[in-house]
Structure formats: C-alpha cells, structure tokens
Image (tube, coloured by chain):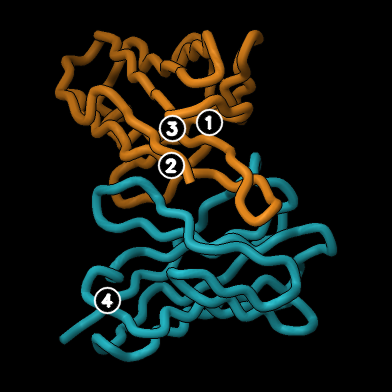
C-alpha cells in the first residue's frame, strides 16, 4: 500500500478566494491523481499530475480553475481557484503503486472544503 | 472501460458473510475488476482486484464468473466496521478508474 497525507484536512473558505491542497506520499511514485467528490456523489477524476510536465485534465476540468503542481515524485498540489459554493466538495489525491503485479491506486484521506 | 451495475444497498448481519454482486457484461479481455470501499468521510480503500481467477487476500475474496461478465466480493465475517459504500470498477489500466454509485453495505447487530 502507500502512506498518503493531505493538508489541510478541512477548510472553510470565502467565495472568490483560492485554496491550495497538498498531497504527500511516503515514497516515490510515478502516477498521482486528483479527484473531487461532491456531496452525496461518487468520485470524479479531475486530472493526472505528471512529474516534470503539465497535468492532464479530464473533460470538464480546466487548468485555470484547478492548477496542479508536481515538483517531484512524492508531492503534488491542487489549487481550487476563485471558489464558489459549488466547489464545496471532498478533494482526494491518489497514487499508483504495484500490488499483486498490477498497478493499483491508493487514496489519501481527503480534504473537506466548504465554500461560503 | 466497461460499465458496472451494482445494487444500491444491502444489509448483512454481523458475523455473517457479505456477498456483494457486480455485473460487468461488457468487460473486455484486458480489463481487470477492482473493488474499493469508502467508509463515511474517508478516502476510498483498495480491497482487491482480479482478471479471471478467483482471488483472496486478508480483507476479502473475489469470485469472477468463467465468462467474466459478473463477479462477487465476499467479506467472510462482516463486522460493523465493514459498513461502507463498496465500488466495483472495471478498467484496463489503474490510471483510469471510473467510480460509479456503488453498493451501500449496512452491517447490523
């Protein structure tokens, strides 16, 4: 498995502001991902954080709204920019790690964001 | 990736086996079946994955039918701590996991 931490664990923010979420993993990994889970909903992939290059965003998510950094193989940040109440969600990072000969994703504990 | 169908909810008595079904009739030959669970307010927890053979680990067993069109996750002795939403995901690569709505398992005394 993998030991993944996220900071902050939760926050309450005002609309129009930005929040940067950090994800730290206990050892080097190639793949890191960011997900959003809106209230009462399932997880939706935002983007894949690539080390040394720009993140790869899924349909419906753009870099201006969710800029991502991946400065090394153990760390990534996701910024939620110009927030509105609709951005209130749990934001989760995950990493890929081999299990049983197969790459598998392991998730962090999540960051609970409430935008007022 | 193939779509999966799971019952929205199930109940199980503590100490009994919990059998969670998943239908994935359009699965293709190179796609694996992954199971995750999400206990309230926590990040999803990896449980098990398989291709075509049955798999067992310390958490659960995964039974995949011979035609691979369905599978069952078995928690042999469910406890209250197993109450969670269980997700069955079919994917050709772990970098593209699409989470559906899952099955909400309620374990009761």
Report whether A76 appears left or right of B12.
right
- Residues at circles 1 and 3 in contact by the CB criterion of under 8 Å: yes
Does the rendering let one see residue B70? no
Labels 1 and 2: the sequence-earlier one: 1
Callouts 1 and 2 on one subunit: yes
Q: Which chain is orange?
A: A
The location of residue B35, given as percent across then percent down, is 53, 63
Quadrant assignment for the C terminus of chain B: bottom left
Residue hosting label 4: B106
Labels 3 and 2: the sequence-earlier one: 3
Residue hosting label 1: A33
The colour assigned to chain B within the rendered structure: cyan
Labels 1 and 3: the sequence-earlier one: 1
Label 1 to label 2: alpha-carbon separation:
9 Å
Report whether B56 appears left or right of A102.
left
Label 1 to label 3: alpha-carbon separation:
5 Å
The location of residue B64, given as percent across then percent down, is 67, 78
Q: Nearer the viewer, residue A84 or A42?
A: A42
Q: Is residue A109 above or below residue B78?
A: above
Q: Give the foreground label among 4 and 3.
A: 3
């Amino acid at each position: 498995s993998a030991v993944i931490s996220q900071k902050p664990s939760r926050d309450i923010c005002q609309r129009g502001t930005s929040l940067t979420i950090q994800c730290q993993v206990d050892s080097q990994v190639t793949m890191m991902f960011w997900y959003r889970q809106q209230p009462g909903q399932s997880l939706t992939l935002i983007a894949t954080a690539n080390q040394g290059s720009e993140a790869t965003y899924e349909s419906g998510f753009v870099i201006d709204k969710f800029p991502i950094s991946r400065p090394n193989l153990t760390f990534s940040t996701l910024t939620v920019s110009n927030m509105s109440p609709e951005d209130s969600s749990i934001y989760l990072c995950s990493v890929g790690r081999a299990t049983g000969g197969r790459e598998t994703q392991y998730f962090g504990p999540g960051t609970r964001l409430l935008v007022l | 990736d193939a779509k999966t169908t799971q019952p929205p909810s199930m109940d199980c008595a503590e100490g009994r086996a919990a059998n969670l079904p998943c239908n994935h009739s359009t699965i293709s030959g190179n796609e694996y079946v992954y199971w995750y669970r999400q206990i309230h307010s926590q990040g999803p927890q990896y449980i098990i994955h398989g291709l075509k053979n049955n798999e067992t680990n310390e958490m659960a067993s995964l039974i995949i039918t011979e035609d691979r069109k369905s599978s069952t996750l078995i928690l042999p002795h469910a406890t209250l701590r197993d109450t969670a939403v269980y997700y069955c995901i079919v994917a050709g690569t772990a970098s593209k996991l699409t989470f559906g709505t899952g099955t909400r398992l309620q374990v009761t005394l």
